[in-house]
Amino acid sequence: MDDARSKQMKLYHRVDRVFNELKAIGMGDDDPIPVEQLCNYDQYHYFGTDAIDEAIALLGITADSQVLEVGSGIGGPSRYLAHRQGCKVTALEIQPDVDATGRALTHRCGLDDRVDHRCGDMLDGIGSTGIYDVIVSWLAFLHIPDRDTLYRRCFESLRPGGQMLVEDYFERGTLSEREQLILARDIWCDRVPTMTDYRVELSNAGFENIELTDMTTSWLSFVMDRFQGFRAASERNRVVHGDAIVDGLHGFYEAVVNLFQDGNLGGIRFTVSKPK
Ligand SMILES: C[S@@+](CC[C@H](N)C(=O)[O-])C[C@H]1O[C@@H](n2cnc3c(N)ncnc32)[C@H](O)[C@@H]1O
């Protein structure tokens, strides 16, 4: 993995900033952390735990489900799933510092027995085939241009009849060269498939029951609110995190707003299943 490229995306630079937030609410370095409280700071996708609640309902995730989260970040969705439903979750994350932060947080939440953090690339597979009831992924596939290999890995990891839910980007209008450059440079995203690409590539991988939902309208309002909220709290954020982190995140949040506002970048949720 090219570390310099992933860190150019400022969301992934200094992910240990989550500990600044915990300190700011008065938590000591080794204090246990209630998951509900941590959820305010550890979700790197849109609509936080509401999006995960929707996934739970759509996929029927229960305490008996074996779940794989692809691109788990600092572990927010995986911990919430394990805490809320009591299921076992494998949290796969490619960036070592991001994975390490996730492990430390999971330990402090007392969820070591339910969330199994693994550091690796989904393109290399997860090492076990046919065992997962459910695969979930929020805003991670956009970093992985080789969808054929990615979908093949997901397909082989699922048990027959298993389901996958993914939230990600799609090309809604034709992305300009400038937009593609911003996506590649600031968002570590080299390819944005169209809705048709999704349907064809998922079908070629063997998936069925392919449902694609356009999320763009609600995501645009989410990213605008996120940017405005961040700007409004700038003074407080500079005290908590320092200038470098705040300036980096400001640029990142703004770039995402501009891309969605221009109308060529869209948000998609898809669900598919592996034949029984
Ligand atoms: C936007 S974050 C989302 C994290 C988490 N899903 C969440 O919503 O809080 C996407 C994550 O996917 C990870 N990722 C990117 N490519 C990956 C790959 N090939 N295998 C595993 N993880 C990957 C990134 O390092 C990043 O931490």
Image (spheres, grey):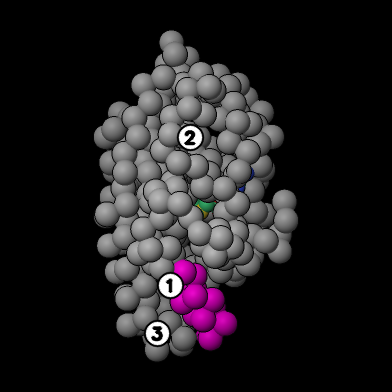
- For mark 3, give the secondary structure: helix
Residue drawn at (60%, 31%) of the image: 148
In the image, is residue 18 above or below residue 61? below
Mark 3 touches mark 2? (CB < 8 Å): no
Label 3 vs 2, first from the N-terminus: 2
Which percent across, then down, holds residue 5? 67, 61
**Crowding near pointer 3: few (<14 within 10 Å), some, many (20+)?**
some
Can residue 226 be seen here? The reply is yes
**C-alpha span from label 1 to label 2:** 28 Å
Looking at the picture, tell me which residue is in the foreground, 168 or 263: 263
In the image, is residue 222 above or below residue 230? above
Q: Give the label on residue 237, or none.
A: none
Residue 36 appears left or right of 276: left
Name the quadrant containing residue 157: top right
The mark closer to the camera, 1 or 3, is 1
State the residue position of label 2: 197
Looking at the picture, tell me which residue is in the foreground, 195 or 144: 195
Which percent across, then down, holds residue 166? 43, 39
Q: Give the label on residue 234, or none.
A: 3
Amino acid type shown at disc 1: Glu
The residue stretch that appears in magenta: 242-255
Label 1 vs 3, first from the N-terminus: 3
State the residue position of label 1: 254
